[in-house]
Amino acid sequence: MSHISANDLKTKGISAIEFALSTSTEAVVQVRGKDKFVVMDLAHYHYLRECELDAALAQTRADLAAGRAVQESPQAHLARLDAM
C-alpha cells in the first residue's frame, strides 16, 4: 500500500494521489507521521461496498435460517415495539 504525506498532498495536490494509486489500489495519507486516511479509486470503493453488502445479506440469511429473526406484519411489529 502506498503512503502519501500530508505535506505531499498539500504541495502536489491530486497528482500525489494519482501517483500513489498508479501502483496500488489504496493509499494511506499520513498526518504528522501517523496513518490517518485512506484514499482509493471510486471503482475500488464501489467493489468494497458491494462486498460489504453481500456479507450483510449472507448474515441476514443465516439469521433467518437459524430462527434469529421475527417475520411479522408491520402492525404486529409496531404492537411488539409498543409492548417493549
Image (tube, rainbow, N blue to C red):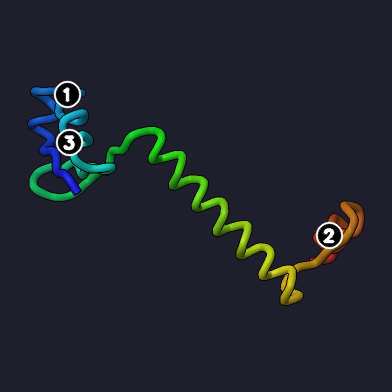
State which tag comes first along the sequence, 1 or 3.
1
Q: CA distance from mark 1 to mark 3?
A: 9 Å
Would you say 57 lies left or right of 19 here? Answer: right
User: Could you say where residue 59 lies in the image, as x and y percent from the top left?
Assistant: 61, 65
SS type, badge 1? helix
Q: CA distance from mark 1 to mark 2?
A: 56 Å
Q: Nearer the viewer, mark 1 or mark 2?
A: 1
Taking the view exactly as shown, the residue that stands out farthest to the bottom is 66
Count residues near mark 3 (Cα–Cα under 10 Å), then give few for <14, some for 14-19, many for 20+. many
SS type, badge 2? helix
State which tag comes first along the sequence, 3 or 2.
3
Which residue was labeled with disc 3?
20
Amino acid at pointer 3: Ala
Q: CA distance from mark 3 to mark 2?
A: 53 Å
User: Could you say where residue 53 lies in the image, as x and y percent from the top left?
Assistant: 56, 51
Which residue was labeled with disc 2?
82
Amino acid at pointer 1: Ser
Amino acid at pointer 2: Asp
Would you say 66 lies left or right of 24 here? Answer: right
For image coordinates 80% across by 67% down, the residue present is 70
User: Could you say where residue 5 lies in the image, as x and y percent from the top left?
Assistant: 11, 38
Which residue was labeled with disc 1?
15
**Residue 75 position (above or below residue 66):** above
Q: Which of the 4 image quadrants contains residue 73?
A: bottom right
SS type, badge 3? helix
Count residues near mark 2 (Cα–Cα under 10 Å), then give few for <14, some for 14-19, many for 20+. few
Count residues near mark 1 (Cα–Cα under 10 Å), then give few for <14, some for 14-19, many for 20+. few
For image coordinates 72% across by 73% down, the residue present is 68
Taking the view exactly as shown, the residue that stands out farthest to the front is 23
Dot 3 and dot 2 residues touching (CB under 8 Å): no
Would you say 40 lies left or right of 10 here? Answer: right
User: Could you say where residue 18 lies in the image, as x and y percent from the top left?
Assistant: 21, 28
